[in-house]
Amino acid sequence: MIRYGDEEWKELKFIGFQFEAERRDNQWVDVTIKVETSELTPLPLDLIDFTIMAICTHDGHPIQLVTLDEGCDCEYQLTEWEKDQINAFIRSEEVHSAITSAASTVGI
């Protein structure tokens, strides 16, 4: 992860994920992801409740990844390798199925 303004960063290796998919509107599904990292690559100590919001199309394609701490934008951004790990998770059958199921939910 890279803290905005810093020139040094550490690559996180994600070893586990918990997620929730929720339809936002007729175009987007939000996937909130809690991550578990390898003990060799812990989250920065100043993060309290870190999550990643993946904004996806109804077909399950991730469009944007937003880092959050306690539900608000945080000062960290993901590296390309971290984004690759998250995108691979989002494209897994389990998450893709949850996204398309959430997208088909009517009531908004």
Image (cartoon, helix red, strand yellow):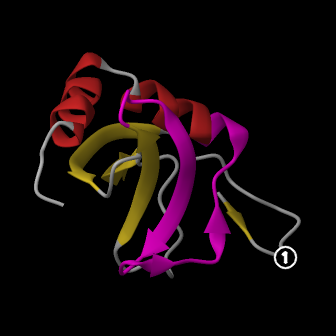
Q: Secondary structure at mark 1?
A: loop
Write down the residue under mark 1. Answer: 5
Say which quarter of the image contains residue 48.
bottom left
Badge 1 density bin: few <14, some 14–19, many ≥20, Cα 10 Å: few
Quadrant containing the N terminus in the rendered view: bottom right
Examine the rendered structure and indicate whether residue 22 appears above or below residue 92.
Answer: below
Residue 65 percent location from the top left of the image: 54, 51
Q: Is 107 on the left-hand or right-hand side of 72? A: left
User: Image check: 75 left or right of 32?
Assistant: right
Q: Pick the quarter of the image with the C terminus.
A: bottom left
Q: State whether residue 36 is above or below residue 66.
A: above
Q: Indicate the amino acid at tag 1.
A: Gly
Give the percent coordinates (x, y) of residue 95. 26, 30
* Nearest to the observer: residue 98 or residue 49: 98
Tell me the magenta residue range.
58-82
- Residue 69 vs residue 31, the one in the foreground: 31
Task: Count the labels in the image.
Answer: 1
Residue at image point 56% right, 42% down: 63
Q: What residue is shown at x 51% (from left), y 82% (from top)?
A: 46
Picture quadrant of residue 24: bottom left
* 18 lies above or below 94: below
Q: How far from the left and from the top, in percent, is residue 21?
A: 23, 47
Q: Residue at x 25, y 52 (%)?
A: 23
Residue 45 point in image, percent of width and height: 49, 76
Q: Is residue 12 magenta?
A: no
Near-viewer residue (81 or 59): 59
